[in-house]
Image (tube, coloured by chain):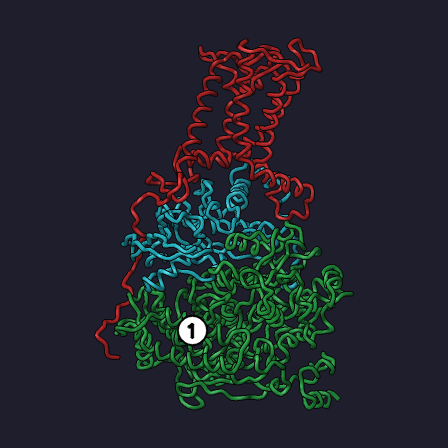
Chain colours: A green, B red, C cyan
Amino acid sequence: MEEIERYRFDVVVIGAGGAGLRAAVEARANGKSAAILSKSLFGKAHTVMAEGGIAASMGNVNDRDNWQVHFGDTMRGGKFLNHYRMAELHAKEAPERVWELEAWGALFDRTKDGKISQRNFGGHEYPRLAHVGDRTGLEMIRTLQQRIVGLQQEDKKATGDYEAGLKVFAECSVTKIFMTGEGDDRRVSGVLAYWRPSGKFVLFESEAVILATGGVGKSFKVTSNSWEYTGDGHAMALESGGSLVNMEFLQFHPTGMVWPPSVKGILVTESVRGDGGVLTNSEGRRFMFDYIPAVFKDKYATTEEEADRWYTDPDNNKRPPELLPRDEVARAINSEVKAGRGSPHGGVFLDVSKRLPADVIKAKLPSMWHQFKELADVDITLEPMEVGPTCHYVMGGVEVDPDTQAAVGVTGLFAAGEVGGGLHGSNRLGGNSLSDLLVFGRRAGLYAAEYVDAAKAAGKTASVSEADLQEAIDWALAPFTNENGESPYAIQFDLQDTMNALVGIIRTASEVQEALTKIESLKVRMGNMKVVGGREYNPGWHLALDLPKQLLVSQCIALAALTREESRGGHTRDDFPEMSSEWRKVNLIERLDGDSVAIVRQPLPLMTAELATLFDTSELGKYMTQEEIDSLVQRTS
Amino acid sequence: MSSSLDIPPASSAVTRTKAKIGVRTLRTDKWWVMPLVTVIVLVSFIAYSTWRAFMNKYYFSEPLISPFYSPCLSDACPPEATLFGWTPFPSNMLGFTISPALFILVFPLGFRLTCYYYRKAYFRSFWQSPPACAVAEPHKKYTGETRFPLILNNSHRWFFYAGLVFNVILTYDALIAFRNADGAWGHMSVGTLVLLANAAFLWMYSLSCHSCRHAMGGRLKHFSKHPVRYKAWTWISKINPHHPRFAWISLFGVALADFYVYLVASDTITNFYFF
Amino acid sequence: MGYKAKFKIWRGDNGDGELVDYAVEVNEGEVVLDVLHRVQAEQANDLAIRWNCKAGKCGSCSAEVNGKPRLMCMTRMNTFEETDTITVTPLRAFPVIRDLVTDVSFNYEKAREVPAFSPPVGLKPGEFRMEQDDVQRSQEFRKCIECFLCQNTCHAVRDHEENKQYFAGPRVLMRVAELDMHPLDTLDRKKTAQDDLGLGYCNITKCCTEVCPEHIKITDNALIPLKERVADVKYDPVRWLGSKIGVRKSDNA
């Protein structure tokens, strides 16, 4: 057996995006050593792609904003399928998390009185998104990265070693989470990872593991997600005995680039619409006015005149329907294209050129201007963009305790950020993901640290058996031993095609069923996958190790999509087009049962009566059964 | 897992080295054109200015004075060419005749030598360090501007201040060129325009300078507390990207202005008067 | 459209390698990275490429295309003639891991030598007040996606391995400038820049600016202003004297 690099840490954080870095900072703040494992280089995580901003009800631009309004918007956006407690914590803690970033060096755009400026975004009642132009995610990742470096400098001063408390393992992918103990004592003991550059294996023994691995979008053909988004955390949680919640809810961002083909799917930030951009079809009509759903009728403008007035006088006018939650806009674009009113390359037009002067566009949307100029040869200050839906975000995820982010069913495992489920319900509002990363990244780090203290106090130090280690290594090397298999690229390509076509933005039972059958056949093909070349930076091998996770998670998405017989947020069933109050009460929970995925219906916790008072009974009536409303009213009185 | 294939080992690399690509650059464009042109132009200018600076004549023809010789500070200068008769330098030293140009040229020369733009130009073209981006330089060792003499480039601001004094004098020269050869005001000739243009180009070159930008506001931490300096900085920041252009235009301008005065003073041409 | 393009791709590891020829299909609107992915999927499964976002936002896919340091995702194929042979090599300033992937840890080590942002003691999160005019300069530098093309192109280290110990490179010095211009940073960073991070090695030949995919004016807006700030404290006796005898107010006000 080759020599294995071994480390001991209190906490291993898998993923170096916003959630992972925030979790690591918090773990160290609580006296724990933490390893940060990242598939990419430090500072390249998918968080950099976030553009619009961080939602936090600081009330800097409109002082009517507060956490209650943010909470309400989040619940509405998620169609009340959110875990109310997560939504509550998120809305309450987001402002502190943003201010903290500023104290660590983030330079947000400013208001006239020197505070953090906030911008409008779809589904948010007030201007709420702290931002830096349209590169907020980059600012956040860089700030956290530099915060980690700052803490390492403090550790260096104290101990002489930069990496005494926090160590970043860049380009180091995790293949497995190890468990130890039986029955009630079963708990996390570490992870196996391999260095992408060298192909060497690394064993980490740790009491706690925090999943911050992001999403699943790379299983779809048209996506804004990078190669990293293969659902690693989701899959490893399942494999460790954890469960996933509501995996059918995928956000198709309404505005991805559609042309040229090589950039299809790349994100066009929602700020384009927040700052005045409008959506039109091939007939030049602002079609969003035709798609305001009943539940939002009294919140959105019904005439272009009123919608246009809103930009300058938001207190006395209703917002334009372009700023409806993302699921509504994505479905509307989809319908327009299907009805033959699309743009030449199969999208619709998003025009900001006729709405704002060129210099304002360049100042407010610099990277969009840059992106279209360089990738599509389109000058957005002169001509409209062509946009269409792209797979962007998974609302579902690892089932966690709302306060501690501890994964349900796996002691010592935590999940934060996109990989966690519950906060966003059936649809996430723009801007809520970055705040999610911060709020729950911090909580995961904090409670993981607490857990480590308790585990150590109870004498439960982590250790991984040699047998488990060897088994995991053998599994990871297996793809090299297939002599005549097929390329992992071909299998991934077929998976992306399948998911896009059959489990995409609009779903039907027969198609989703077909997808499940295809996934089974892909699993068979995967068993005979061939990797050529050596172990040193071999992307073919890396893909072969990610692919099983992708297939497992795709299966979960499809199975949940088949089970939920209603349309809500990021899950639209052509054969069940209505939203159902009965289904709202249901969380779909998936677990591994041997090799197969088991799905069960579990009740969604009903929000507290106190929180319910933030909504009109008539509004709750649009989502909840009379029985639920009665019980809430009863509890209040 | 039964197989006839061997599992490859992990990398055994302990230290890694750069890719051995062998050639100096793989650039396929004409990267050598710019440094070559720079060398040709600068060498021509140096040759011309040296020839003229040592010539010690044809630099004054009432009311025109060549910018190479202004201010004229030697006791050999024609009284009309001096600044209010101020001539602190002797025309002879240790038996050598010293051209008045030599007393003053160190200032504009120093300003341009330490200029952030010219540094790029000569480091690239003369010293080839580097000749163009991603083209290997020929030197074994490189210490940049960390030691003598190149550390002196940090004195750019002093030459900038001196340059301002020269700009005032050359502007004065242009203004007094609104006279005729007899000293009467209210006239204008081609020479007036030449000196005016020269002064204007020099002002633009000086004001767009990086040290100027720094002094006017760049060194501040809080623009918001210094609105006037912030305005100045903002304006300079707008012309600063054109500093290279002004550097070249003003260089040609000085040479052409001098050449015009030479032609007039040597009676090769007559200074044409508009009125 | 669609045509077969001729590519030469550097393949190898630990320094040794060669340019390997590939003929590969190119479609309308593609960038170099798309074409290399096609090579990877169809002809060389193990071709090592580092990439992430494919939208010019993460700075992972840095390489040299026809000798010019570029992001492969932002190098459009229609900037070449169909008859051109396109040569792609790894970054030349850093050790190669394999094929087009290099070990860029130099940049992270240098970044760690820059003292972190230090706000005034006692100023609590939520109490920070800064004017847009005052944060704008530093915001430009924070556009940096850390692609390290500037670090790779700067001849001070690209051509002189031995200088790596003295010179931190444009990206890192730009970070120092960013902090020195930060309205609420309290450290004086000028001497660090010159004495510890090697600002004097910069001879302002501007290649960092030329290759920056974010079009940050690294030289004009960060390095030269930083040199001027260093001159204030190190090479300007008048200012030095003025500050010693208290005639001169601090510019940190």
Local crowd size for mark 1, using a 10 Å CA cut-off: few (<14), some (14–19), many (≥20): many
Question: Can you give x and y, in whole percent of width and height, for residue A74 in the image?
Answer: 64, 74
Name the quarter where the C terminus of chain A is drawn.
bottom right
Q: Residue lying farthest right? A: A316
Q: In the image, is residue B66 above or below residue A464? A: above
- In the rendered structure, which amino acid carries the disc numbered 1? Leu
Question: Can you give x and y, in whole percent of width and height, for residue C62 in the image?
Answer: 42, 54
**Image check: A76 left or right of A105?**
right
Question: Can you give x and y, in whole percent of width and height, for residue A359 in the image?
Answer: 64, 49
**Image check: A520 left or right of A77?**
left
- Which residue is the site of mark 1? A495
Q: Residue A386 or C208: which is nearer the viewer?
A: A386
Q: Residue lying farthest front? A: A340
Question: Can you give x and y, in whole percent of width and height, for residue B231 in the image?
Answer: 67, 42
Q: Residue C219 or B80: which is nearer the viewer?
A: C219
Q: In the image, is residue B226 above or below residue A225? A: above
Task: Write the residue at 46% across / 20% down.
Answer: B48
Task: Write the residue at 40% across / 47% down.
Answer: C81
Q: Residue B238 or A321: which is nearer the viewer?
A: A321
Q: Chain of mark 1?
A: A
